């Protein structure tokens, strides 16, 4: 009997996707930070609490609009988001223009390259005709997160008859871009009418890295992975949806290949901590570079398992109207929950950061909190 195709396929991926497997250094990243940032403590005056020990912080009363024009506080917020992975704010009055200002400032005040602006999503942009406010405003720098659009474009995952594993939803945003995201801000203004469903979960990439053995940690640190998103071209063809193919928030983010190679372990410049990055759903159609297809599948499956099956490195957020979540796409993964039938909609602003890099001198989160490498 012939062996299964996967076992005889010892080739690396197709020639058009051959990339250098060199892990990018800090100097090549474009980040303006040479060392991690330390909070001034300016947010300590506001009520806040950790949601779990590993990930998630919540401010139950602070309005982001109150701190938007105070650069010290916005910088401290960015540092907190990078440390805690995701930060939640309840019932916010932040309008869409201010949400964009905040999105750009978080990275600007923490050393992102000058050419990195707000992301213009190839598919989730103004061409879809969904307004970002009550005046009918259309904006390419806002991705409308829409249950109706998801059910149309991604029917097998978001349709009511889906039998897919929910854990397939774990991802970090837009990692197929050469310049991916640092921070994202999501405000959900419309929730399922029966008052339940549509929670979002986040998982710590720092803790995922910390759960690998030292041998696997150093192995992973030497790898790069190609992140690939073929769905946009499929949707464009199937639904005649035009895509944005130029300057999606940074000069490097052009074209319609939606594939980019990044280090598997990434240093977050703001915390200085190492995070598992080349993992989860953004690699579903991608691969670990420079290894056989079979080896790539094994690594991908294990990294996804560490993220999806360790509920103690995850946090689950139950949205109420106008709540806001701010997360660091460099160091956390997240997934929507498709367990509702009604309409759910929100506005997401995604900021672009540095080119992902790995600094061998950086530390893990556990090491940093234990007081080593500070
Ligand atoms: O709808 C959600 O809960 C999250 C969707 C998502 O992945 C995002 O906003 O980046
Ligand atoms: Fe996302």
Image (tube, rainbow, N blue to C red):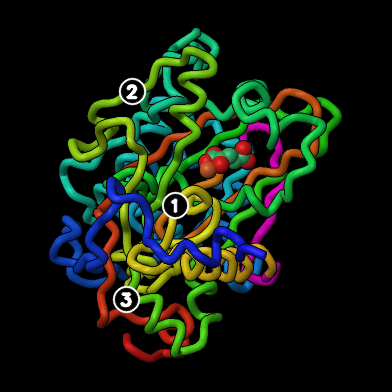
Where does the image place residue 120, in percent across and percent down from the top left? Answer: 35, 29
Residue at position x 53%, y 64% in the image = 297
**Crowd around label 2: few <14 · some 14–19 · many ≥20 (10 Å):** some
| Range of magenta residues | 310-323
How much space separates mark 1 and mark 2, taking CA atoms?
21 Å
Q: Residue furthest left?
A: 27
**Circle 3 residue:** 222
Q: Can you say which quadrant of the picture contains the C terminus?
A: bottom left
**Residue 316 part of the magenta-drawn span:** yes
Mark drawn on residue 244: 2
Q: Secondary structure at mark 2?
A: loop
- x then y, percent, for residue 8: 50, 65
Question: Badge 1 is on which residue?
Answer: 286
Residue 280, by quadrant, is: bottom right
Is 110 part of what is drawn in magenta? no
Q: On residue 41, which mark appears?
A: none
Quadrant hosting ligand 1:
top right
The answer to whether the beta carbon of the residue marked 2 is less than 8 Å from any atom of ligand 1 is no
1 or 2: tag closer to the N-terminus: 2
Q: Residue furthest front?
A: 1
Pointer 3: residues within 10 angstroms few (<14), some, or many (20+)?
A: some
């Amino acid at each position: 009997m012939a062996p299964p195709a996967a076992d005889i396929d010892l080739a690396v991926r197709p020639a058009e996707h051959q990339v250098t497997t060199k892990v990018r250094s800090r100097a090549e990243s474009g980040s303006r930070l040479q060392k991690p940032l330390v909070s001034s403590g300016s947010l300590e005056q506001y009520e806040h609490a950790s949601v779990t020990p590993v990930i998630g912080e919540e401010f139950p009363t602070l309005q982001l609009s109150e701190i938007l024009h105070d650069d010290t506080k916005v910088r401290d917020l960015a540092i907190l988001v990078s440390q805690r992975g995701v930060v939640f704010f309840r019932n916010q009055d932040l309008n869409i223009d201010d949400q964009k200002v905040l999105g750009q400032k978080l990275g600007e005040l923490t050393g992102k390259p000058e050419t990195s602006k707000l992301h213009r999503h190839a598919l989730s942009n103004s061409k879809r005709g969904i307004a970002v406010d009550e005046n009918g405003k259309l904006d390419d720098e806002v991705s409308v997160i829409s249950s109706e659009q998801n059910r149309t474009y991604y029917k097998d995952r978001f349709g009511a008859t889906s039998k897919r594993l929910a854990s397939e939803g774990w991802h970090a945003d837009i990692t197929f871009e050469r310049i991916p995201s640092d921070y994202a801000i999501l405000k959900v203004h419309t929730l399922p009418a029966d008052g339940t469903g549509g929670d979002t979960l986040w998982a710590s990439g720092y803790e995922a890295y910390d759960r690998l053995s030292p041998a696997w940690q150093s192995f992973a640190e030497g790898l790069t992975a190609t992140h690939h998103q073929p769905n946009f071209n499929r949707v464009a063809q199937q639904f005649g949806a035009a895509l944005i193919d130029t300057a999606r928030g940074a000069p490097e983010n052009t074209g319609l290949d939606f594939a980019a190679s990044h280090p598997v372990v990434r240093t977050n410049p703001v915390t200085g901590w190492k995070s598992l990055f080349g993992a989860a759903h953004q690699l579903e159609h991608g691969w670990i570079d420079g290894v056989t297809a079979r080896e790539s599948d094994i690594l991908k499956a294990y990294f996804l398992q560490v993220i999806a099956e360790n509920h103690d490195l995850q946090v689950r957020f139950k949205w109420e109207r106008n709540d806001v979540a701010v997360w660091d796409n460099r160091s956390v993964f997240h997934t929507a929950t498709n367990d509702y039938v009604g309409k759910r909609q929100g506005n997401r602003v995604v900021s672009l950061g540095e080119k992902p890099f790995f600094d061998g001198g950086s530390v893990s989160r556990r090491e940093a909190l234990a007081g080593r490498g500070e």
